[in-house]
Amino acid sequence: MTALVENDFVATLRAHSARYHHQHPFHVRMNAGELSPRQLRGWIANRFYYQENIPRKDAAILSNCPDVEVRRRWIRRITDHDGTAGTEGGIEAWLRLGEAAGLPRAEILDHRHLVPGVRFAVDAYVNFTRTRPWVEAVASSLTELFAPDLMAERLAAFERHYPWIDAGGLAYFRNRLHQAPRDCEHALEIVTTHCLSAETRAAAIDALSFKCDVLWSQLDCIDTAYPE
Ligand SMILES: O=C(O)c1cc(C(=O)O)c2c(n1)C(=O)C(=O)c1cc(C(=O)O)[nH]c1-2
């Protein structure tokens, strides 16, 4: 009985793929090769704000998490993005993606292209992880269950449709192909072991819905700011 209910819980989480931002019209146009250089650069510059805030939200989760075993594994996410002495992290890789697309790193770093709604959505995500119970914050990261398929599609689309972007700039997406499955396996393990009541399971599902909205809202704002 418990196993069956747990299967339902995981199935409900996975069913959120239907609300994932791979379906957003901006991503659909991106993968179909229909975006202009200006639109792609706008997306890269705005998505940087998400990238640079991911380690801050992971630090918020660490600060709220009392379990040393979880912290020992979760901390890896921060160095994946920030890098370490001698190794490039995701933030640097994203800046290189920008440069490969003709966007100077200074223009990404100073947020001159950042639109208010993207800032608002990303700040809402970080705030959520600071203020909600840590297991809910972990559940909100489960959009990464759906990310690898989108990354693989995006990689192929960039190579095929946007050859003006130097292929060396695509390392960020390649790295996420193996980082995301590892990360979401851990997140799913945490959520399924900690959310055993109807209430905690409902809260985890709500957290994942909220995160789908965060990702969708970012693209809505980028889409509006960079019309065809
Ligand atoms: O480009 C994307 O579509 C996409 C989506 C997501 C996601 O599903 O949250 C993440 C990422 N990229 C990503 O690069 C990343 O590092 C990441 C971390 C997280 C998270 O919530 O912990 N999501 C994502």
Image: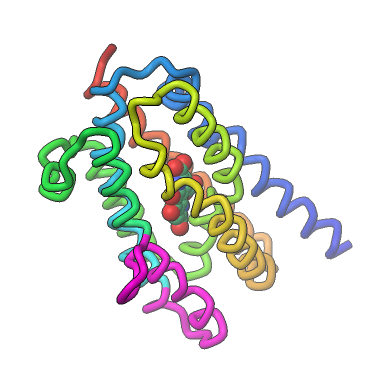
Query: To which quarter of the image does residue 37 belong?
Result: top left
Point out residue 45 in the picture as x, y percentages from the top left corner: 24, 39
109 sits left or right of 160 in the view: left
Point out residue 152 in the picture as x, y percentages from the top left corner: 57, 38
Q: 100 or 57: nearer the eye?
A: 100
Asked whether residue 166 is drawn in magenta, I would say no
Asked whether residue 77 is drawn in magenta, I would say yes
Query: Does residue 99 appear in this view?
Result: yes
Q: Residue furthest bottom?
A: 68
When the figure is inspected, residue 40 is found, relative to residue 205, above or below; the finding is above
Query: To which quarter of the image does residue 112 belong?
Result: top left
Q: Residue at x 24, y 30 (%)?
A: 42
When the figure is inspected, residue 61 is found, relative to residue 114, above or below; the finding is below
Point out residue 96 in the picture as x, y percentages from the top left corner: 29, 47
What count of labels does the image hold?
Answer: 0
10 sits left or right of 125 in the view: right
55 sits left or right of 186 in the view: left
Q: Residue at x 61, y 56 (%)?
A: 181
Bounds of the magenta segment: 62-89
Query: To which quarter of the image does residue 82 belong?
Result: bottom left
Magenta span dominant secondary structure: helix
Q: Residue at x 39, y 44 (%)?
A: 168
Q: Residue at x 45, y 67 (%)?
A: 77
Q: How is the image coloured?
A: rainbow
The N terminus lies in which quarter of the figure?
bottom right
Q: 165 or 181: nearer the eye?
A: 165
Query: Does residue 210 appear in this view?
Result: no
Point out residue 214 in the picture as x, y percentages from the top left corner: 39, 42
The C terminus lies in which quarter of the figure?
top left
Q: Residue furthest top?
A: 228
